[in-house]
Image (cartoon, rainbow, N blue to C red):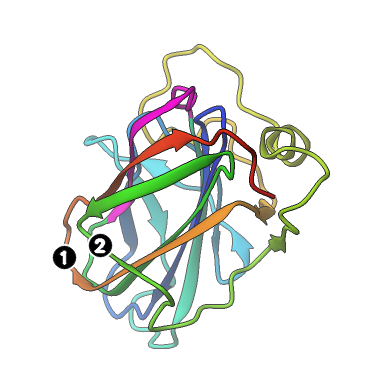
């Protein structure tokens, strides 16, 4: 699930249900410029590493253990602000193992109209499969603080500079990152994704009056 802030930045979480029979790691290709903030396996924090290709490696349970478990990642991606609107794109994470069911949920700024969605995943009214998202907070969509303030209160952004590579784990926090589900929700899904780069593209335009 991805929260898209009006200043353009995105806060994202991925949940991967894994049944591991042979692998020690799962390699994840995060969006360009992403800062990995936390990683969990079976509800416990794990320390990721970065391989020679710049991909994030998350250690899995011991090979041969057939019990399914969940890998959870949270990251932050800086991007230009929405301004008056225009074309937008959200690259989705890619995994180096087959994914039998891939879903994405975007929470978009309410001050804009969002239309002409396209990409490698299909937009749907409701997901074919439901997942119990961890650490999610339901927003009321009304008054209160703006999404950009949520980022400031819920996260400590990694310091700029230092030339971190895409998918860098610098600034990673050993705590679960809360996600505020607030905004216009758009759902997408696809069955069977095998090491394919996916993204969601759309257009937006600032409304003349705000939607609450």
Residue 12 at what x, y percent from top left? 51, 48
Q: Which residue lies at the image location 43% right of the left edge and 34% below the top edge?
A: 205
Residue farthest to the bottom?
66
Q: Badge 2: few (under 14), some or many (20 or more) residues near its Cα, within 10 Å?
A: many
Q: Nearer the viewer, residue 86 or 33?
A: 86
Residue 176 is at least partly visible in this image: no
Residue 124 at what x, y percent from top left? 35, 71
Q: Which residues are magenta?
A: 78-94
Q: Which residue lies at the image location 49% right of the left edge and 36% below the top edge?
A: 169
Residue 149 counted in the magenta span: no
Q: Which residue is mark 1?
A: 194
In the displayed structure, 29 sits above or below 24; it is above
Residue 105 is at least partly visible in this image: yes
Q: Which residue lies at the image location 41% right of the left edge and 42% below the top edge?
A: 49
Q: Which residue is mark 2?
A: 121
Residue 55 at what x, y percent from top left? 30, 42
Q: Nearer the viewer, residue 200 or 102?
A: 200
Query: Quadrant of the rendered structure where residue 101 is?
Result: bottom left
In the displayed structure, 3 sits above or below 53; it is below
Query: Which label's residue is closer to the chain start, 1 or 2?
Result: 2
Q: Nearer the viewer, residue 136 or 200?
A: 200
**Would residue 147 be found to the left or right of residue 87 on screen?**
right
Residue farthest to the front?
208
- Element marked by disc 1: loop
Q: Which residue lies at the image location 74% right of the left edge and 33% below the top edge?
A: 149
Residue 153 at what x, y percent from top left? 78, 37
Alpha-carbon distance for marks 1 and 2? 13 Å
């Amino acid at each position: 699930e991805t929260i898209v802030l009006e200043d353009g930045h995105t806060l994202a979480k991925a949940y991967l249900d894994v049944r591991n029979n042979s692998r020690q790691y799962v390699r994840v290709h995060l969006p360009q410029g992403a800062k990995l903030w936390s990683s969990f396996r079976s509800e416990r924090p794990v320390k990721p590493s970065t391989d020679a290709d710049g991909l994030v490696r998350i250690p899995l349970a011991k090979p041969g253990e057939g019990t399914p478990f969940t890998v959870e990642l949270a990251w932050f991606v800086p991007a230009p602000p929405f301004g008056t609107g225009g074309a937008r794109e959200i690259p989705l994470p890619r995994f180096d193992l087959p994914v039998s069911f891939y879903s994405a949920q975007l929470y978009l700024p309410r001050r804009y109209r969002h239309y002409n969605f396209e990409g490698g995943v299909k937009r749907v009214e409701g997901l074919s499969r439901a997942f119990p998202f961890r650490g999610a907070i339901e927003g009321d969509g009304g008054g209160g603080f703006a999404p950009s303030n949520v980022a400031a209160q819920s996260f400590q952004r990694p310091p700029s500079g230092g030339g971190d590579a895409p998918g860098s784990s610098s600034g990673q926090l050993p705590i679960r990152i809360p996600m505020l589900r607030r905004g216009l929700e758009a759902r997408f899904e696809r069955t069977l994704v095998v090491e394919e780069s996916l993204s969601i593209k759309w257009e937006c335009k600032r409304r003349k009056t705000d939607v609450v």
